Image (tube, rainbow, N blue to C red):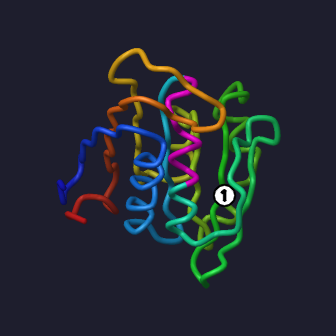
Amino acid sequence: MNDQLPADFVVEDAQSMRALGAMVATWVAAGDVVVLSGPLGAGKTTWVQGFAEGLGVRGPITSPTFVIARSHPSVVDGPALVHVDAYRLNAAIEFEDLGLDADLDRSVVVVEWGDDVAEVLSDDRLVVRIERCEVSEVTAADGAVGPRSVRVVGYGTRWVEPL
């Protein structure tokens, strides 16, 4: 495994995607922002399911597409998870209106589709980019199916040092 950022991974299936999310959860602390990007069906929510398990928060973890944001409290005395789907937001100003910065010091905020909007929360953030390695099918039961390439990049002073 690469112990510095950026880190690149090839993920073969949904179980491995969840395991990668759980591993990245060990890198974060309250106040951190994680931005997820990738095409529809790439496995973003599947990754968040593993991330949530790694954080030890109450589930279930489902896509917050229509409610925009869901908060999941910790069950292990750690930070809460605020899971945001910015897909339906039209601009950074709508993202700012969610008031996510109010909970940031006690939570880890994960924003799906957060490119160009999550920067309002913090200059320091992890960006997780998920891409299909080849044409592969997606099933509702399994989430991401087929190989994916995942790149984790840190931005800002928080992520300058090796993990």
Quadrant of res 140:
top right
Residue 22 percent across, percent down from the top left = 45, 61
Mark 1 falls on what kind of element? strand
Residue 108 percent across, percent down from the top left = 56, 63
- Looking at the image, the residue that sits furthest to the top is 135
Span colored in magenta? 40-49
Kind of residue sitting beneath label 1: Val
Residue annotated with mark 1: 82
**Residue pictured at 24% horizontal, 47% vertical:** 7
Quarter of the image containing the C terminus? bottom left
**Residue pictured at 18% horizontal, 55% vertical:** 1
Quadrant of res 143:
top right
**Residue pictured at 66% horizontal, 29% vertical:** 87
* Vertical comparison of 19 with 128: above or below: below
Q: Is residue 5 left or right of residue 51?
A: left
* Vertical comparison of 150 with 27: above or below: above
- Tell me if residue 101 is in the magenta stretch: no
> Magenta residues: mostly which secondary structure?
helix
- Tell me if residue 45 is in the magenta stretch: yes
* Vertical comparison of 157 with 140: above or below: below
